[in-house]
Image: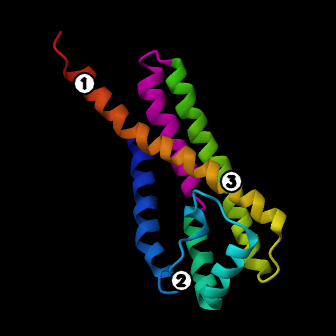
Amino acid sequence: MTVVSFILFLINAVALVIFGKKLSPYSALPKLDFHLAGYDAALVQQLFTEYGEAGRGVYFWLTVLDTPFPFVVAFFGICYFSYTWRAWSYPMVWRVLIAASYGFCVFDVVENALIYRFLATFPNISPVGVAICSISTQVKLISLLTIYLAAPVTLLVSLLRRFRPA
C-alpha cells in the first residue's frame, strides 16, 4: 500500500507542477495555496483581478486538480510513517507525522472549498472567509513541510537500519 500511495502522490504532485505553470502568465503573484505568511482580502482581490476571467478559470481547474491531493498525501503519510516509525516503535514521532498527514488533509480541503467559494463569488469576497482560508493555508503548508522533511529523513533512517552491520 505504501508504494501505491507514493505513486498516486507522485502523479498528482507532478500534474500540479506541470499544470500550475499555466497560471503564471496571468499574475506574478503566487497562488493563494503558497502563501506561508498568509494573506488578506485585499490580496485576494488583487490576485483575482490580475488573473482576469481567463486566469480565474485556470485557477478553478487547478483547484479541481488539487482536490484529490490532500487525500493522496494523507494516504501516503499514514501508510509510509506507519510502516516505518510505528513499526520501529517510535510512537511520538509516528503520532506527530500522522497528525501532520491528517492536518494537511483537513486544512487543504478547507482551503480548496474556500477558494472555490471565492472564485464563485468574486468580486464579493468575504473577509472572514479569507481569514479562515489564510489560516488554513498556513497550517496546511506547515503540515506539508513537516511531511516533506520527514519523508527523506525516514528513507535515510530506513536505509541505515537496513544496511547497518550486525
Residue at left offset 53%, top offset 71% = 30
In the shown orientation, is residue 116 left or right of residue 87?
A: right
**Which of the 4 image quadrants contains residue 88?**
top left
Q: How far apart, in angstroms, are the residues tagged by discs 2 and 3?
A: 22 Å
Q: Which residues are magenta?
A: 67-90
User: Where does residue 159 sit, x and y in percent of width and height?
Assistant: 25, 28
Residue at left offset 67%, top offset 48% = 106
Q: Residues within 10 Å of mark 2 (few under 14, many from 20)?
A: some
Q: Amino acid at mark 2?
A: Ser
The label shown at residue 160 is 1
Here the colouring is rainbow
The label shown at residue 27 is 2
Farthest-out residue, top: 166
User: Would you say residue 147 sits in the magenta stretch?
Assistant: no
User: Would you say residue 72 sits in the magenta stretch?
Assistant: yes
**Helix, strand or loop for disc 2:** loop
User: Where does residue 77 sit, x and y in percent of width and height?
Assistant: 50, 39
In the shown orientation, is residue 117 left or right of residue 148?
A: right
Q: How far apart, in angstroms, are the residues tagged by discs 2 and 1?
A: 45 Å
In the shown orientation, is residue 113 left or right of residue 95?
A: right
Task: Tell me: residue 154, above or below residue 9.
Answer: above
Task: Tell me: residue 46, above or below residue 138.
Answer: below
User: Residue 34 versus residue 21: which sits nearer the camera?
Assistant: 34
Q: Count the marks: how many?
A: 3
Task: Tell me: residue 18, above or below residue 52.
Answer: above
The label shown at residue 117 is none
Task: Tell me: residue 42, above or below residue 83.
Answer: below
3 and 1 marks in contact (CB < 8 Å) = no
User: Where does residue 40 sit, x and y in percent of width and height?
Assistant: 72, 67
Q: Amino acid at mark 3?
A: Ser
Q: Which residue is mark 3?
A: 136
